[in-house]
Amino acid sequence: MASLAIVERAYRGAVEVAYFDALFLGIEIHRQLGLDLLLRGDAVTYAVDAPAPEPLLVGKRPVDTLDAPRADLLRLRDLGVGIRVESEDLAALGLGAACLIDGAECVAAGELAARWPDYDRIFFL
């Protein structure tokens, strides 16, 4: 059986990312245990199919230590991680299933909670 990781909070700052962020941890969990991923809350935006943001400039200096959650999510998808996104949280942001990256699946709120017994472990990242 696989593990389930739930990510609810979106980007929490460059210092965290400079060391080890939630999606990078997901890559390691998947390597060792197998993983499905559920995005909730503001973290649903990680799965939106959109171009990478422009670099942040502070004065004339680009800041390149910022998070790239979509790139990490694409890597997880390519490794075979099941990616699910709560449709209600997408709708709250004015988004729908059509805006998601290939391989991401919309699910109703609570749908995966009903399937928790199917998982060996549940992680809140």
Image (spheres, helix red, strand yellow):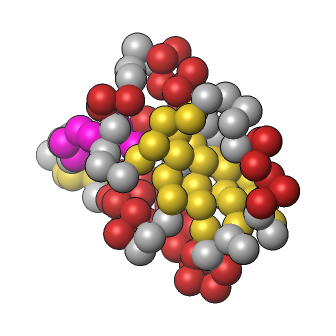
Does the magenta run of residues contain 50? yes
- Compare residues 9 and 2 and report the one nearer the observer: 2
- The residue at 64%/85% (across/down) is 32
**Magenta segment, principal secondary structure?**
loop
- The residue at 43%/36% (across/down) is 45
Above/below status of 79 relative to 95: below
- Compare residues 84 and 9 and report the one nearer the observer: 84
Q: Percent position (x, y) of residue 43?
A: 53, 39
Q: Percent position (x, y) of residue 8?
A: 64, 40
- Compare residues 113 and 66 and report the one nearer the observer: 113
Q: Is residue 8 left or right of residue 60?
A: right
Q: Quadrant of the C terminus?
A: bottom right
Q: Percent position (x, y) of residue 96?
A: 38, 23
Does the magenta run of residues contain 103? no
- The residue at 70%/43% (across/down) is 112
Q: Is residue 76 left or right of residue 25?
A: left
Q: Quadrant of the N terminus?
A: bottom right
Residue 58 falls in which quadrant of the image?
A: top left
Q: Is residue 70 left or right of residue 37?
A: left
Q: Percent position (x, y) of residue 47?
A: 40, 43
User: Which region is colored magenta?
Assistant: 46-52
Q: Is residue 13 visible?
A: yes
